[in-house]
Image (tube, helix red, strand yellow):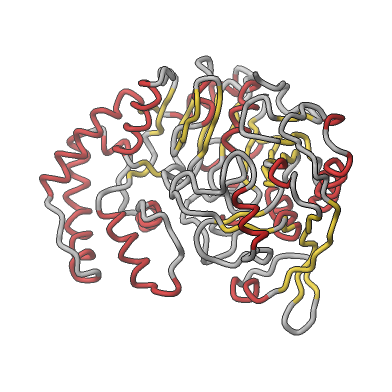
Amino acid sequence: MPAVVVIGGQWGDEGKGRIVDLIAQGASVVARYSAGNNAGHTVINDMGEFKLNVVPAGIFYADKTCIIGNGVAIDPAILLNEIETLSTRGVSVANLFISDRCHVIMPWHPLIDLADEKMRGDAAIGTTGRGVGPCFADKVARIGIRVGDLVDAEAFRARLSFVLPYKNQVLEKLYGLPQLDFDEVFDSYAALGAKLAPFVRDTAQIVHDALDRDETVLLEGAQGCLLDLDAGTYEYVTSSVPSSSAGGAGIGIGIGPTVIEQVVGIYKAYMTRVGNGPMPSELLDETGIMLRKEGPRPEIGTTTGRPRRTGWFDAVASRYSAMVNGVTSGVLTRLDVLDNFPAISICTAYETEDGRTLTSMPASSVQLSKVRPVYEEVPGWLAPTSRCRSWDDLPPKARDYIRRIEALLQTPIDIVSVGPERDQAIIIHNVLKVKPRK
């Protein structure tokens, strides 16, 4: 069987966790391939509500192998705490494995992250301050520390002996921060490495072995395509290498592109964004507040706890992400949030300051911040959808809205989510041979 990639088609927070939890039924391996603990997935199942930062959302199936791939940045303390929390609540982590090629978030990374944001002033990116960006910057600069180094005390000491003096100079001379003590860093992180060691493997080989057995591998993305380092609204994007697109999935897990045959794109029925950067359809009025508060779960960031910016569905941005990712199957989430709106708007184009109409996303964040959304208004359905379990159960105007989104995306919508519970998923066309879970 081929590998299947799940990506977020907007600025993250599209509900990828609950969709991965659903369609993981049809996979043998579920692998996270990018980002770090700056991204979060919320999953609700019969065991309760879980907030995952790094562990793949397939962890709730004891028969699935879950992998944290080489494209993920690891904060050892946070990951170990997440593993302990899952174990304490009865979730098996026996089949969880971490790539020895993952880069490690070291104690200087959050310090630099926060200091950089402060230095940027009004141009701050709006990062989570978790040190993920500086960790990936070190990866590219070839001065990073990897999990394979961390679990080998001798290798870790040798690597830290080179990296820490360099970073201490950066902390002191560039940011005016105190230097870090070598022994304190070594002792604390060597101890964390020893605790992580039982989970560390050559995970690329595990994935290849599964593919050789004709098993399906589900590659779980984090954040969203519009935060992708190359494809997103630069410079207000993630620093992950590989980034939040389907093209980076193979690199982030250690497989070639020829085995990826399906890309599932997750789209919220409206738009949200956390952090700074342009968002053409953002609503700063009562309607935006209503979007944030409607439904069983308010729009609050899983990882950051920050209120999300909200707006009408942006078909221009969403179609762009479908195009650059080669999305073959679309999923529309949180449709139930729109239940109480008498009219719903869809952004179908942008109008520039000089009166030009754009139907594709400009590369410049400055230009994107100045466009005016061109809206198409459709009637709302003013009826609850959270109890709908089939296509025919949905109100006719809700079905019309889905079909309009499908036409604008130029991608089939195969699953519609009407709530956070496992059984609140309407499967229109089968994805990985799954069925609603109760």
Residue at the outermost top position: 63
Residue 280 picture quarter: bottom right
Frontmost residue, 393 versus 20? 393
Q: Residue at x 19, y 53 (%)?
A: 162
Tell me residue 20's x, y (percent).
60, 31
Q: Residue at x 19, y 33 (%)?
A: 191
Frontmost residue, 200 versus 189? 189
Give the quadrant of the C terminus. top right
Tell me residue 407's x, y (percent).
85, 49
Q: Residue at x 67, y 46 (%)?
A: 268
Q: How many marks?
A: 0
Identify whether 390 is placed above or below 374. above
Tell me residue 44's x, y (percent).
55, 29
Identify whether 331 is placed above or below 348. above
Instruction: Judge left or right: residue 160 versus residue 320.
Output: left
Tell me residue 25's x, y (percent).
63, 21
Identify whether 352 is placed above or below 88. below
